[in-house]
Image (tube, rainbow, N blue to C red):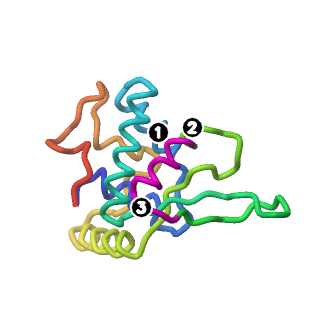
Amino acid sequence: MNELTYRFLAAVSDGLGDDLYGWHTGIAYRTRESEDQVEGRVLGYVRQLLTADLIGLGSIEADEQGHGVWTDWRGSVDELLSRAAARYGRSDTVWNLYATSTGRGRRMFDSEAARREAAGVDPWEHGGQVFRDIWDADGNVIEPHGDEIVV
């Protein structure tokens, strides 16, 4: 697993999920791409992660009484991606578009975190600079295929 894939799985490993727009802002800062390019990039990553069953998607939706209720999204990858694209970047709901963990994704993350720990590497060393080891200060990819999902 490469660093980018690991970072995405780490982001959802606590079971609480992670706001996809947070991924957007972190990537935009590193790559210096236009908003549309970053959106396409993030949704491409989401497609690959969904296809591999490494993440799910969900949001808080209003129930019949208007109360916010967590909803795990269901459907094909194309349906989920279409729904995600329609909500991408909107701020009119709380927890608008979240990546969530899956059983397969958690197992893969736990395995990689244990491998790193056994090798003497802190699996949480990235701290708040989630994408710093993917792109250099000029927005160039640091390693071959480093900006792709690699398991």
Amino acid type assigned to the residue bearing label 1 in the image: His
Mark 1, residue position: 24
> Does residue 90 appear to the left or right of 124 in the view shown?
right
Disc 3 secondary structure class: loop
Disc 2 secondary structure class: loop
User: How many angstroms separate mark 2 from mark 1 (CA)?
Assistant: 9 Å
Magenta span: 74-86
Disc 1 secondary structure class: helix
Residue 126 or residue 29, whichever sits in front:
29
Decide which of tag 2 and tag 1 comes sooner along the chain. 1
Asked if marks 3 and 2 touch (Cβ < 8 Å), the reply is no
> Does residue 69 appear to the left or right of 21 in the view shown?
right
Residue 43 rendering spot, x and y as whole percentages: 40, 44
Q: How many marks?
A: 3
Mark 3, residue position: 76
Asked if marks 2 and 1 touch (Cβ < 8 Å), the reply is yes
Amino acid type assigned to the residue bearing label 3 in the image: Ser
Instruction: Answer few, some or many: residues within 10 Å of disc 1's Cα (few below 14, many 20 plus, some between 14 and 19).
Output: some
Q: Main secondary structure of the magenta part?
A: helix
Kindly give the residue lying farthest to the left in the view shown: 144
Q: Is residue 81 magenta?
A: yes
Tell me the residue at 46%/39% (across/down): 24
User: How many angstroms separate mark 1 from mark 3 (CA)?
Assistant: 23 Å
Disc number at residue 89? 2
Residue 90 rendering spot, x and y as whole percentages: 62, 38
Instruction: Answer few, some or many: residues within 10 Å of disc 2's Cα (few below 14, many 20 plus, some between 14 and 19).
Output: some
